[in-house]
Amino acid sequence: MPKFEDRIYQWFLKRSGKNESGKVRASGVMAKLCAEIANDPIAIRKALLHLQSKGHLAFSADPRGEPISPFITVMRPVTDTPAHAGRWQTVLENSGLPESSIAALYPLYNALEDFNIEHMGVLLSGLRKLRDEQHLFAGQPSYVVSATCLMGSSKLLFALDAKSLRLFGIDIDKFTARAPYVIVGGGGKAPQSVILVENPIAFEAAVQSSASIQHTFVCTFGFGLSNTQSEYGNQLAGAVEAGRAILLRRTEGVYTSFEQFLQHPEIHFWGDLDIAGLQIFERIASRIPHLKLSALYNPMIKAAGDPVCSHPYVVAVGKAGQKAFKPIRNDTKAALKHCEKWAVDQEIVSSHDIQIFSGSALEFR
């Protein structure tokens, strides 16, 4: 099929959607094709007639080739439909749901390969109940909502396409993620500063250093609660954005809530010297304007200039795919200049340097 005709055919395929009849209303089609494909009505009429002759479209046309029938029927290409997709379609069509709901839920078949007809029926009943009673679950953890409504599984809700659920009328944003935990340590009754730490390994090194006498360190509790190693900093940012978290104490301290730490006048961020780490910093700083980069970045910036102590953005070091971004803050811009091509992980900072640089903000010359 010529490229121009294929673009028009794909246009019709998209607009016919999940409509079983495959029909598209002909009124206004020429104007839409001219606006979205090419402002050349003669070429479009020729393409429509050729698609009609090949059996891709079915319609009545005037002598010029312009459709005059009320609808244009789109002949979809024959594809091998998975058996579970057919089962799901049968369940949906027998459900009594309106066409719009069937179209919204149909893509969920991708997650239902091992489901039989009975399983699918039970799932659909659960989805309908959740849609109708979702106000009763507002603010509850998604895992609890899923287990309560969807076949006793805490994970099933996450396996289903979020866009389809929203189109069906389930506002999944009303449900919360799992409770945010942060671990805190050091600082005693009057910490001189609060330092948000991206990585729990670096956090543990800081708590065990003498710097913990004067400064409080805060980190998401990664072990057993993070999905992957790369999520530590993002979980910390998420907790800051929510403004609340459950505190797990590594040592005793005076603060009793996460909000108190965030309000400390001297609050700093210490993460990896890489693009992703600085993105996390900007994300947190958008909620805490007085947040500063910690002086603990100093030994990392020094290491970034040494090929023996820095690494490129490659798969082996877990940094492939980190893409440059446009920072808002001047301190972020300055820090990015030191890690455009080479990165340094915060674990390189020694206990001695943690003692020296903790509590001070990073200054650029």
Image (cartoon, grey):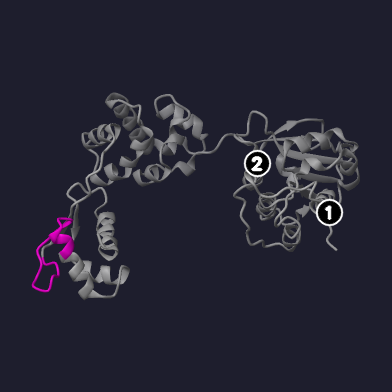
Predominant SS of the magenta segment: loop
Q: Residues within 10 Å of mark 2 (few under 14, many from 20)?
A: few
Looking at the picture, does residue 158 appear above or below residue 313? Answer: above
Query: Taking 316 as reference, is 3 left or right?
Result: left
Q: What amino acid type is highlighted by mark number 2?
A: Ala
Q: Disc 1 versus disc 2: distance between alpha carbons? A: 31 Å
* Image location (x, y in percent) of residue 134: 41, 38
Seen in the picture, residue 100 relative to 12 is either above or below; the reply is above
Q: Which residue is mark 1?
A: 361
Task: Please say whether residue 351 is one of the residues in the magenta stretch.
Answer: no
Q: Earlier in the sequence, mark 1 or mark 2?
A: 2
Q: Is 272 placed above or below 251 here? A: below
Name the one closer to the observer, 363 or 256: 363
Q: Is residue 24 visible?
A: yes
Q: Quadrant of the N terminus?
A: bottom left
Task: For the C terminus, give its image quadrant.
Answer: bottom right
| Quarter of the image where one finds residue 2 | bottom left
At 36% from the left and 37% from the top, the residue drawn is 110
Taking the image as shown, residue 75 lies to the left or right of residue 85, namely: left
Q: Tags 1 and 2 in contact by the CB under 8 Å rule?
A: no
On the image, the x and y values in percent for residue 44 come to 22, 70
Residue type, mark 1 in image? Ala
Place of residue 52 in the rendered image (x, y in percent of width and height, measured from the top left) = 14, 60
Report the span colored magenta: 50-68
Q: Secondary structure at mark 2?
A: helix
Q: Nearer the viewer, residue 146 or 90?
A: 90
Q: What residue would you read off at disc 2?
A: 316
Secondary structure under badge 1?
Answer: loop
